Image (spheres, rainbow, N blue to C red):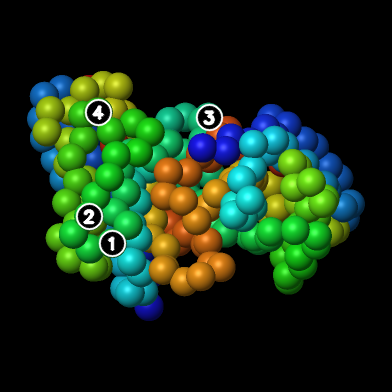
Amino acid sequence: NAGVTQTPKFQVLKTGQSMTLQCAQDMNHNSMYWYRQDPGMGLRLIYYSASEGTTDKGEVPNGYNVSRLNKREFSLRLESAAPSQTSVYFCASRPLALGNYEQYFGPGTRLTVT
Amino acid sequence: LAKTTQPISMDSYEGQEVNITCSHNNIATNDYITWYQQFPSQGPRFIIQGYKTKVTNEVASLFIPADRKSSTLSLPRVSLSDTAVYYCLVAPGANNLFFGTGTRLTVIP
């Protein structure tokens, strides 16, 4: 199993450009998440999807959109990138299992907006 | 949303036991307590979870008092490779999680 995979690993954008960050998991997990982590800070939740077909806002959703394409894939889109969106983006997934609260994280995408 | 308070940083010598305490005064009845570890340039990694009393696995122990308003992660005999940031989370069953800034543990040779 590859676990949680993210593409690309690195990306540089100019202000105003758009891009989509891809995330896929092969563990048959129900819930998927997108976080951002700024230097020296903890993770902040952008959006999450509790199950296929549903998405909800997290702590910092402004400037982002998401799509839960199917059970495996959860993408994050920046429509018009801004320098404030320079960050490391992590995708995570979690199974729907009573008593199991472990999230599995991907390796991250390092995004720089100039 | 139950937030947590942890020390910003801790130093320890190799081979010592390290205890990191987390306060979560507003923890709800159904909330679990979860700890994650994060190395530089990597995503967080689950360490341990618990509801009450004590939980132990091959990596760490988690101590939770009866009132559940705090918890302590115990790492036995730390090594240099345990240098990382440790996050305490509550309500991990909920989807809107708060990671906070964590505790930066530095293990000294």
Residue A51 badge: 1
Q: Which type of secondary structure does the marked residue at label 4 adopt?
A: loop
Residue B108 left/right relative to A14: right
Looking at the image, residue A37 lies above or below residue A33: above
In the rendering, at what x and y percent does residue A63 appear?
Answer: 21, 29
Give the mark, 3 or 2, whose residue is nearer the N terminus: 3
Please name whichever residue, A101 or A79, is drawn nearer the observer in this view of the structure: A101
Q: Which type of secondary structure does the marked residue at label 2 adopt?
A: loop
Residue A40 badge: 3
- Which residue position is annotated with label 4? A62
Q: Nearer the viewer, mark 3 or mark 2?
A: 2
In the rendering, at what x and y percent does residue A67 appear?
Answer: 17, 51
Residue A37 left/right relative to B27: left
Question: Residue farthest to the right?
Answer: B16
Residue at x 75% of width, y 42% of height: B70
Q: How far apart in space, not on screen, are marks 3 and 1 (Cα)?
A: 31 Å
Residue B55 left/right relative to A2: right
Q: How far apart in space, not on screen, are marks 3 and 4 (Cα)?
A: 21 Å
Q: Which type of secondary structure does the marked residue at label 1 adopt?
A: loop
Residue at x 78% of width, y 53% of height: B64
Question: Residue farthest to the front?
Answer: B29
Q: How far apart in space, not on screen, are marks 2 and 4 (Cα)?
A: 18 Å
Q: Nearer the viewer, mark 3 or mark 4?
A: 4
Residue B89 left/right relative to B19: left
Give the mark, 4 or 1, whose residue is nearer the N terminus: 1
- Which residue position is annotated with label 2? A54
Residue type indicated by callout 1: Ser
Chain assignment, label 3 = A
Residue type indicated by callout 4: Asn
Q: How far apart in space, not on screen, are marks 4 and 1 (Cα)?
A: 22 Å
Chain assignment, label 2 = A
